[in-house]
Amino acid sequence: MKLKIKKGREYQSIEIKNEDSLYEIIGKDKISNFNMDLISKNVLLFKKNNKVMDLTYTINDNTVYLYKNGKEYSFEFLDEKALRRLSSTGGLNAGGPVTIESPMPGKIVKLLKSVGDQVKEGEAIMIMEAMKMENEMKAPYDGVINKIFVRENDTIESGAKLFGIE
Amino acid sequence: MKEIKKVLIANRGEIAVRVMKSLKEMGIKSVAVYSDADRYSKYVRMADEAYYIGASPSNESYLKMEKIIEVAKISNTDAIHPGYGFLSENAQFSERLKKEDIIFIGPSASSINMMGDKITARKTVEAYSVPTVPGTTEPIKDVGVAIEVAKKIGFPVMLKASAGGGGKGMRVVHDESEFESSLNMTQREALSSFGDDTVYIEKYLEEPHHIEFQILADKYGNVIHLFERECSVQRRHQKVIEESPSPFIDDKMREEMGDIAKNAALSCNYEGAGTIEFLVDKHKNFYFLEMNTRLQVEHPITEMVVNVDLVKEQIKIAMGEKLSLKQEDIKQVGHAIECRIYAEDAENNFTPSPGKIEYLEEPTGKGIRNDTGVYSGSDVPIFYDPMISKLITYDENRESAINKMITALKDYKIVGIKTNIPLFFEILNHDVFLSGNYDTHFWELYSSEFFKEDEEEVEQLKEIAAAVFLKFRKKENKLIDSVKESSNWKLNGRIGG
């Protein structure tokens, strides 16, 4: 089966074969084999050449979250069906404008950038206060701010649109 | 002496759980209060009685003094334990309870007042020969005057909110040019966090260590110290890891600081459990920083090395008992470390990561203690400090306590939200931390080295994720197939009949 995996703003192809708990991943220049069992909703057992990796996981829509040593790794997939649906609506186009939403409820303390500003990845766009701490909302990519949806002192909900970048 | 048979905990989360455990061991009933967000919290499940006190924001629930007092009366509560944060250092609350004839498990209003305002605190302890950091004792009113003062003390200086605490409302200013903007920011934060924008200036010490002493004091002027906690690993002045004993100070200094800590407690007629925070510079000069007139988040590491239950001692003191422990009874044995586990994304500027804990496995074993406020299936609400638990390990020496912590962190599985656990592997494996020779600059010096991505590992995890995705899809499809099969069978059955 072929899957598409999201990497940054693009999708990468991955081919995978499975029989019982054996998996084979066919990459561009290598083939990888391992054992994997989903023991419960959140626990899996992974073995490669008899070496064990201790992992827990969860899955939400098309995103798989793996946890190793307390760290969360997320991987977003598309199967063939979803891929057809997306490409017909043009959703796979990379480089278009993106709207950044607030990851949490809070209050906008200060706007640091305005529409039209050229920003670098990781640059702070605004300061938001949440959980009694001031947090910087940063640009996810290099680009130009094309819209700012909030004003200073606005109280916002989680998921509220903050700014657009392209 | 007044007996305590029932205690209301005016707090939530892990500290409410922690307090209830000691209450249960003492045969005392516990009363929980909760907001909307905490309806199903672990501490509510543990309590003997639980009362709803209001909406989720803390100013509509956990900070509502009158509501809490009303519940105390309805429930026939003898005493209130404030935990830390919320009303724990509120002098007015202590005073009100006294009038209502409800015991406040903590110090008197006057002790809280003396120590709560940093400027008053300095004056109070100085009268008892406690050394303090050079700085202003008057609040900043005029920027120009303040800059002159800062120049006289010498840059870098520290700006501090008078009503601040827990690392909030503090800022270092390295030179004159950034003074005014830093002052504005500190005042703004102070006003929004504490409702008071009073700020003062202090000398910034070289390679300082944050070392604090635990004290216990009864109503009869008996004070003991229970040794120190090294809290120099801090991010934005918030403690990240604490350990006891401190790897930096020697026994002679320990004794000297312990005596001075006791003096600081005596200076404000303290009663209960309290903490004297010191800054120790690289030349081993030490200065009183502030006193925390409550139980500290990091109190468990002290409990581990001196083998005393501080909550039980607080309750005995509140009942009017004399301290049964003498200074010579208190011995610092072994080594303890604490990691504060937060629901936050350590690799993304420590953004809070509230949400549902889908699955939880906690580390266990000899010398492993996890003071937790959550369970598998519970929520970490957005309204409060996003601490999930405090993980503490104890062993005979520092090295094995650290090794035990690394193993315990690996065994700690939290699925559904991001936590700062990855951060601790970075710190606990860092050479400077391992050497024990670290100060409060540890974070700014070394945190940029953290979280180097292992590309090979991410590649492997990507393959595993693909396998998980595939397996899941197959399961879903099977489900659809089996439904189809059963309806076909029914259809065929009907045709056949």
Image (cartoon, helix red, strand yellow):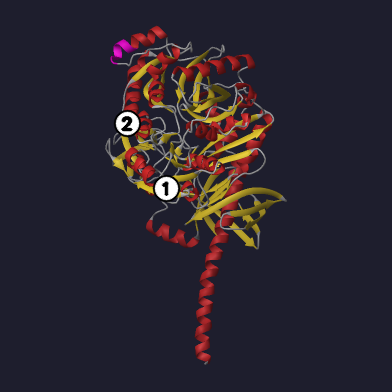
Q: Is residue B116 above or below residue B469?
A: above
Q: Main secondary structure of the magenta part?
A: helix
Between the residue at mark 1 and the residue at mark 2, the CA separation in whole angstroms equals 24 Å
Is the residue marked by circle 1 packed among few (<14), some (14-19), or many (20+) residues within 10 Å? many
Q: Quadrant of residue B211?
A: top right
Q: Residue at x 50, y 26 (%)?
A: B218
Sequence-first tag of 1 and 2: 1
Near-viewer residue (B489 or B218) = B218
Q: Which residue is mark 2?
A: B192
Q: Residue furthest top?
A: B152
Q: Is residue B270 left or right of residue A118?
A: right
Q: Looking at the image, which residue is at 27% across and 37% down?
A: A151
Query: Where residue B27 appears, x then y in whole percent?
Result: 54, 44
Which residue in the rendered view is the most extreme toward the bottom? B497
The residue under label 2 is which amino acid type?
A: Ser
Other-residue count near label 2 (Cα within 10 Å), few / some / many at <14 / 14–19 / ≥20? few
For disc 1, the chain is B
- Mark 1 highlights which residue? B38
Residue B418 appears anywhere in the view: no
Q: Nearer the viewer, residue B395 or B314?
A: B314
Say whether residue A49 is magenta: no
Which element type, helix, strand or loop, lies under badge 2? helix
Whether B168 is drawn above or below A35: the answer is above
* Residue B293 appears anywhere in the view: yes
Instruction: State the image quarter where residue B243 is shown.
Output: top right
Instruction: Using the image, name the chain to which the residue with label 2 belongs.
Output: B
User: Residue B376 versus residue A24: which sits nearer the camera?
Assistant: B376
What residue span does the magenta drawing correspond to? Answer: B141-146
**Three-letter code, disc 1:** Asp
* In the foreground, B214 or A14: B214
